[in-house]
Amino acid sequence: MRNLIIALMLLVLLPVGVNAAEAENVAPEGRKRVVVIDPGHGGPRPGKVMKDIAEEHYVLDVSKEVRKQLKTKMSDLEVYLTRSSDSAYHEKQAEDNKRRAEFANRKGADLYVSIHANAHEKTTVNGCEVWVLTLNERLMNQNQGQAARYADDGDFIAPEDIDRTSQGFMMAVARQLENEPFSRFFAEECCRNMSSYGLKNLGVKAGPVFTVLYYFEGPGVIVELAYLTNSEDYAYLSKKGSKTEMATAISDAIVSYFKALDGDASEPAESAEESTTESVEEAAPLTEGYTIQLISSTTEVDKSDYQFKEYKGRVELYMGTGRYKYKYCYGSYATREAAREELEHARKTFKDAYVVRFKDGNIVAK
């Protein structure tokens, strides 16, 4: 019965959560994209310290380099740091983390990246990894110990301390359902980039409720650069140029993320002939053919809705029959085979996407 009540509350609150996140994270025309970089720890909490490396200083240097690189790579992107010196927002870690997330909310961040270095009691453990928020109870409990090994007190909200019936939790669940695909996309890009410098790719992980992510309203991650407790990772982090390389990995992932978000695939320039052909196709859109249905709805949805971020400006509404008559689709193709070639990409964001036939603005049977 308790689970049913929670499910019903979520259904009621989900549209509210979506709209709240949309207001913060979708860039209206004329507003710049915003990213907030959070150098972990600082002030009374140095983080992990190994020989000559203190986490608080190392990640601050990397964060500043990320900001510097982004000024060149994406000059129209607004970049903020939660701290630019050896400082903290509050003496208590839980409150400090919460205020960092609230800072990102106030800035209207479209992406929040908290940067850390890792540690483990087993010195053989090494590699880079990126954590995303989960509110799945099984995963929370399963990974709580793993992530909390060298954490500061207050870095996590204990699963048993979360009131599952509270409106705040329901809103957080709604935000997570909306933001997780975007957080994972960035996290995967970041892991690939960091591992290109010789670090072992430990992949994307979801586990405990990090306070620094829980209170943020948009897509966010915690980047763990490498393990200071491992000799190979330590040797890499201590070598000259490693901070620049890690910053490059992160800044490149940020650029890829926003380009994907805004529909800029950065494909190679087309030949004049190819460009002319595409212009003709755009001037004379198909009135009959095949398209990829992303979602269907019982009510009309704004085509600029947050869930369509990756296909901004390219989502079309077709009408169908039955209760879910509003069909939101991407692309128009002369043949079913051509549509299927794009289906795999669409399913990375919309796992239930499939190819349908349309005619004169309506979805029709074969």
Image (cartoon, rainbow, N blue to C red):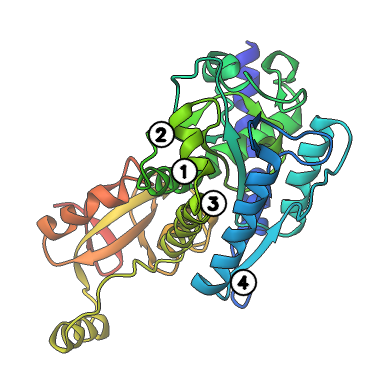
Measure how far apart labels 1 and 2 are at the Cα level. Answer: 8 Å
Q: Residue at x 77, y 47 (%)?
A: 102
> Tag 3: Cα neighbours inside 10 Å, few (<14), some, or many (≥20)?
many
Name the kind of residue labelled 1 in the image.
Ala
Measure how far apart labels 3 and 4 are at the Cα level. Answer: 27 Å
Of discs 1 and 4, which sits in the foreground? Answer: 1
Q: Residue at x 37, y 65 (%)?
A: 316
Mark 1 element type: helix
Residue under circle 3?
A: 243
Q: Quadrant of residue 143?
A: top right
Q: Residue at x 45, y 22 (%)?
A: 125
Of discs 3 and 4, which sits in the foreground? Answer: 3
Image check: 326 left or right of 64? left
Residue under circle 4?
A: 32
Measure how far apart labels 2 and 4 are at the Cα level. Answer: 30 Å
Depicted 64 relative to depicted 56: above or below: below
> Who is closer to the viewer here, 142 or 171?
142
Name the kind of residue labelled 3 in the image.
Lys
Q: Quadrant of residue 170?
A: top right
* Rendering coords of residue 139 (x, y %): 52, 19
Name the kind of residue labelled 4 in the image.
Lys
Check whether the beta carbons of the residues at disc 2 and disc 4 lie within 8 A of each other. Answer: no
Residue under circle 1?
A: 187
Q: Is residue 217 visible in this depiction of the protein?
A: no
Name the kind of residue labelled 2 in the image.
Gly
Measure how far apart labels 1 and 4 are at the Cα level. Answer: 22 Å
* Rendering coords of residue 235 (x, y %): 48, 37
Name which of mark 2 and mark 4 comes first in the sequence.
4
> Tag 4: Cα neighbours inside 10 Å, few (<14), some, or many (≥20)?
few
